[in-house]
Image: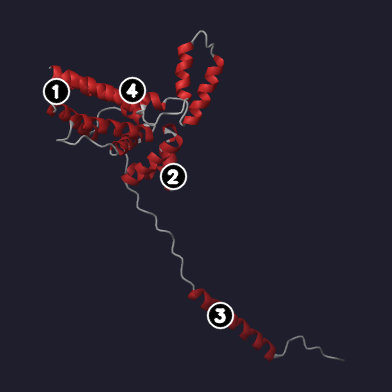
Amino acid sequence: MTVVDIFPPPHTYTVSLCRKVNVRRKVCQAMASRPTKRPATRLPLNRERVLEAAVAIADRDGIAALSMRRLGRELGVEAMSLYNHVAGKEDLERGIVEVVLLEIENPRPGGDWKAEIRRTAVSSHDAFVRHRWSCSLLTHGGGVSRLRMQWMEAVLHTFREAGFSPNLTHHAYHAIDSHITGFTLWQVGMPFRTREELVDLADGFLRRIPADEFPYIVEHAQEHIAPPDPAEKPEFEFGLDLILDGLERLRDAE
């Protein structure tokens, strides 16, 4: 009877085990030599970061897209954690308006009054157009912020120091403010953003109206299509300079 040894020789197992130990040791040494990847450090959340993210959402997707939940997703946090930095949606909206107001150049004391009022008006218009939602939010928001009052005070001060009476200063301020606000709201409310979109809109408009019945409307629409003259002022500045020249005449006549 032949006896079959089912167990391997002891030395075979010992060699196999040693090889496994050596392989594992090399793997561990290789892993230890690799630089350890640390988890990305999240920037601490504060009011400034919250407002910056909110402005980015409103600029990109419109003010209607802004919500506490959407803002939380943008920042990678739960919406409830935002209430440590903003009191709620109204406070958030007031905050993002103030971010825009900080972009506006206030009139500087001691300068030429027309140049300073013109500069702050153009700066205001540019800021409100960059953030197309902001002018509407400013006009419909409740109350007047300290930052906005500082701009108002600087404008009123500029008129008074230039020799405008209190009454004429009152009218001058509202003429400038309403031009900034009214023109901007009209501009951002148009159904186009680029000149190419404007030309396409005007072309379609011209094809639909009878030129013999509305010749001056056709003429006006063609002015929109014509290549812009680089020597001409932008429309906002054209109206602004008319107001400033008129205010100067009124002041001189007082």
Side of 241 relative to 35 (left or right):
left
- Residue type at the position of mark 1: Phe
Residue 182 - label: 4
The answer to whether the residues at label 3 and label 1 have Cβ atoms under 8 Å apart is no
Q: Which residue is mark 1?
A: 164
The answer to whether the residues at label 3 and label 2 have Cβ atoms under 8 Å apart is no
Q: Nearer the viewer, mark 2 or mark 4?
A: 4
Q: Which residue is mark 2?
A: 74
Can residue 89 be seen in this snapshot?
yes
- Residue type at the position of mark 3: Lys
Can residue 174 be seen in this snapshot?
no
Q: Quadrant of residue 151?
A: top left
| Labels 1 and 2: the sequence-earlier one | 2
Q: Secondary structure at mark 2?
A: helix
What percent of the width, then of the height, locates residue 29? 51, 78
- Residue type at the position of mark 2: Glu
Instruction: Measure the alpha-carbon separation of dots 1 and 2.
Output: 49 Å
Q: Quadrant of residue 23?
A: bottom right
Q: Secondary structure at mark 3?
A: helix
| Labels 2 and 4: the sequence-earlier one | 2
Side of 253 relative to 245 (left or right):
left
- Residue type at the position of mark 4: Gly
Residue sticking out furthest to the top: 213
Residue 26 - label: 3
Q: Nearer the viewer, mark 4 or mark 1?
A: 1
The front one of 220 and 131 is 220
Instruction: Measure the alpha-carbon separation of dots 3 and 1.
Output: 87 Å
Q: Nearer the viewer, mark 1 or mark 2?
A: 1
